[in-house]
Image (spheres, helix red, strand yellow):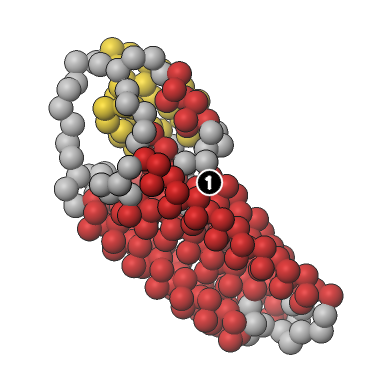
Amino acid sequence: MLKTIFYIAKMDCPSEENLIRMKLDGVLEVANLDFDIPNRKLIVFHAGQTDQIEKSINELNLGGKIISTEVTDQLEFKKNTNQKKLLWTVLGINFSFFLIEMSTGLISKSMGLVADSLDMLADSFVYGISLLAVGRTLIRKKQIAKLAGYFQILLAIIGFIEVLRRFFGVEKLPDFSTMIIVSVFALIANGICLYLLQKSKSREEAHMKASMIFTSNDVIINLGVITAGFLVSWMNSIKPDLIIGTVVFVLVIQGAIRILKI
C-alpha cells in the first residue's frame, strides 16, 4: 500500500472535498481518502502508480500537486458512519438559505443576495449529488452531476443578464439593511456547516476550525455582500450590489464547471 500526500490549493471548504471524493470514486487503485481542509492537504492510500489519481485531481482545476509518496503498512481505515446524516444536515442548511436568500434578494432587489443564494444552491448540488450517488453506478453519478452543473450555469447566465439590465436601466436602490442582515445569518449558517463537517473528522482544535471557517470562499462571499450593503447605503448607488453579484456569478459558474468535470 502507498500513501501519497497532495496539496490542493483551492480546497477551502467541504464542497471541494465532496467533489474530489466523487471524482476519485471511479479510480480502482484508491483505498482511502483522508482530508485536512485547513491545511489544504489530501492523503490518498492506494495501490499502484499515482498517474491516474493525479490526472483525476488535476481535471478539477483545484491546484493539486503531489507533496510526497511513501510505502505504508496501514490497511485498516476508520469509517465515518455518520457521513450520510451530516450530508443531509448541511444539505438542509444550504438549501434553506438558498430559498431565504433568493426570496429576500428578489424582494429587496439585491443581486448580491440572489447571487449568494445560487452559491448556496451550488453547495447543495454537491452534497445532494453525493447522497444521490450512493449505490448508483459511476455513469449514473456523472449523469446526475452534469445535469446539476448545466442547471447551475443556466441560472448564473440568467443572473448575468439581469445584472446587465439593471446596470443600463433605471432601478431603485436595493434594501441594504436586508442585504446585511440576511448575509450575516448566511455567514453563521456557513460557519455551522463547516464546523459540523470538520468535527466529523475528529479535528476539534479551535485554531483549525477557525482557519477553516475564515479561509472559506463561502464566508468571503458573505462578507462581500455585507460590504456591498454598506457601500450601497454610503454611496447611494446600485453599483456595489451589481459588482458583488457579478463576482459571485463568476464563482458559481466556476463551481459548475468543476461539477461537470466529475
Q: At x 41% / y 68%, what residue is drawn? A: 95
**Which secondary structure, mark 1?**
helix
Q: In this figure, which residue is indicated by the disc labeled 1? A: 260
As rendered, which of 28 and 82 lies closer to the eye? 28
Left-right relation of 69 to 58: left
Q: At x 71% / y 73%, what residue is drawn? A: 162
Quadrant assignment for the N terminus: top left
**10 Å crowding of disc 1: few (<14), some (14-19), many (20+):** some
Question: Where residue 135 sits in the image (x, y, percent)?
Answer: 25, 47
Taking the image as drawn, is residue 66 in sight?
A: yes
Question: Where residue 254 sits in the image (x, y, percent)?
Answer: 60, 49
Quadrant position of residue 179: bottom right
Question: Where residue 239 sits in the image (x, y, percent)?
Answer: 76, 72
Q: At x 50% / y 26%, what residue is drawn? A: 55
Question: Where residue 25 sits in the image (x, y, percent)?
Answer: 35, 36
As rendered, which of 138 and 192 lies closer to the eye? 138
